[in-house]
Amino acid sequence: MERIERHACFGGWQDVYQHHSVALNCTMKFAAYLPSDVIDKQYPVIYWLSGLTCNEQNFITKAGAQQFAAEHGVIIIAPDTSPRGEQVADDDAYDLGQGAGFYLNALMAPWRDHYNMYDYIVDELPTLVEAHLPANGKRAILGHSMGGYGALMIGLRNSERYCSISAFAPIVAPTQVPWGQKAFSAYLGEDKSLWARYDTISLLNEIQVTPPMLVDVGTHDPFYHDQLKPELFAEVCQRKCHDFTLNLREGYDHSYYFIASFIGEHIAFHARYLKN
Amino acid sequence: MERIERHACFGGWQDVYQHHSVALNCTMKFAAYLPSDVIDKQYPVIYWLSGLTCNEQNFITKAGAQQFAAEHGVIIIAPDTSPRGEQVADDDAYDLGQGAGFYLNALMAPWRDHYNMYDYIVDELPTLVEAHLPANGKRAILGHSMGGYGALMIGLRNSERYCSISAFAPIVAPTQVPWGQKAFSAYLGEDKSLWARYDTISLLNEIQVTPPMLVDVGTHDPFYHDQLKPELFAEVCQRKCHDFTLNLREGYDHSYYFIASFIGEHIAFHARYLKN
């Protein structure tokens, strides 16, 4: 694990690391914000999962999260959104292949050789982070759009591993919308019985106790009605979850201007549970 | 003047406009953050000038300034850094031509047909802003690197027009460092008597009363010793200015992570004088 970027930022450090990933069988980068210069202290970790077309840079350059991470004393880890490199299968479309890993383990050729983002995010990355950075073992997960889906799916499937879950403009029901159907068909194949373990709605119906969850969606998000459909998720949550909030933000869109406007509330939300 | 982007952001609007510039004789874009939805109120305006290679997007996507503009109730205008277009002279180097207008009026061919950023920033842009946006006529100016130079130079030459001036990592003495010498030679020619009106140190020595000024420079800025040399400016200020602060920020570099970390302090500084 090699540090390839370091910038002083809000009294801490915005770093970027590069390493060989076993799960993905390629070289990967991830960003790490450390909230302070103090090296003999340990901090909870919030994992941020980005959306389609993003890499490890988008969140750290555009969301303005460092200010709040410094304030609450949390590390933020922002990985890339897919395996990378010339030897990694790709597609010309923005919503399949590199930049569009959908946080699952692919079953189909040509994807299955590298596209194991689920294993990477759930196991390999936290192991690496907790071995090399001042992490105290407490974790939360959040994300945006495809990464909002990833945060909900991974958080629900591994609720013992995450204190809290949140999402901006998530794809809440991938099996019912075009982005998810296209990705699941390609990565998992047409046998829809294999889709359920990656379907947030199915997972929500299955598990007994959900971690605290916060979801924000902009009412002017151009993907609201076709791809996001937050009501599908909220309807189940309102029956099943004791701690779930859906904020519909009047006038906001799908951009990082939306994320930046409310990232402070999301980090405060996670900090509340991470520090319990 | 046509609005080509609009995003809800921190309770206000991050907009981008496009218009034909008379001073620059080309189509230009500028970004405008409006701190609120209230349209029958008027706000002071802070002009942000970006550095080499930037356009109207860098500041609005990376600095995290909207949060503080909303808090203090100020408009922020972020123009492009040079004239643009296929018919506009350019150079392969990053520090000359498009993206490197240096906020002056060029005297030499091939630059003089379009490179009149001084007139654009001092006259044309404020006139446009004050005619079309809810601006109350109070102005402040700040910038980064080449734009930090622009803010100091323009603010000092027009001290009756700006309530306050600030800069991140400015080129404080363009006639004494490589970036400035290269640009001045190309745009103004080799007759150095013509350089003085664009030289911040000369301007500072000339004028009687300077507006309040704030300058931040990171101690780990890779351009600190060769291009920025803040001490050259601070030394004159300490003799001449009753309200001047130079903050040397330990460990910070030249990036937007540095700007983001202290932009809140700069906006609070300007708000203090804009609201007098």
Image (cartoon, coloured by chain):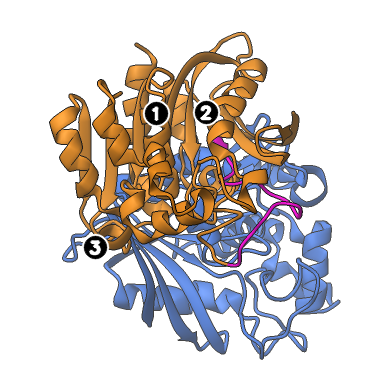
Chain colours: A orange, B blue
> Which residue sits at x=67%, y=64%?
B53
Indicate whether A180 appears above or below A216: below
> Which residue sits at x=55%, y=66%?
A93
Indicate whether A140 appears above or below B33: above
| Residue B47 can be seen in this image | yes
The answer to the question of whether label 2 and label 1 lie on touching residues, with beta carbons closer than 8 A, is yes
Label count reads: 3
**Residue indicated by mark 1:** A157
Marks 2 and 3 sit apart, C-alpha to C-alpha, by: 50 Å
Residue A55 locus on image (x, y percent): 59, 49
Q: In this picture, which residue range is highlighted in magenta?
A: A77-92
> Is A64 one of the magenta-colored residues?
no
Residue A141 locus on image (x, y percent): 43, 30
State which quarter of the image contains the C terminus of chain A: top left
Disc 3 and disc 1 on one polypeptide chain: no
Judge left or right: residue B145 versus residue B16. Answer: right
The kind of residue on which mark 1 rests is: Arg
Q: Along the polypeptide, which appears first: circle 2 or circle 1?
A: 2
Numbered badge on residue A122: 2
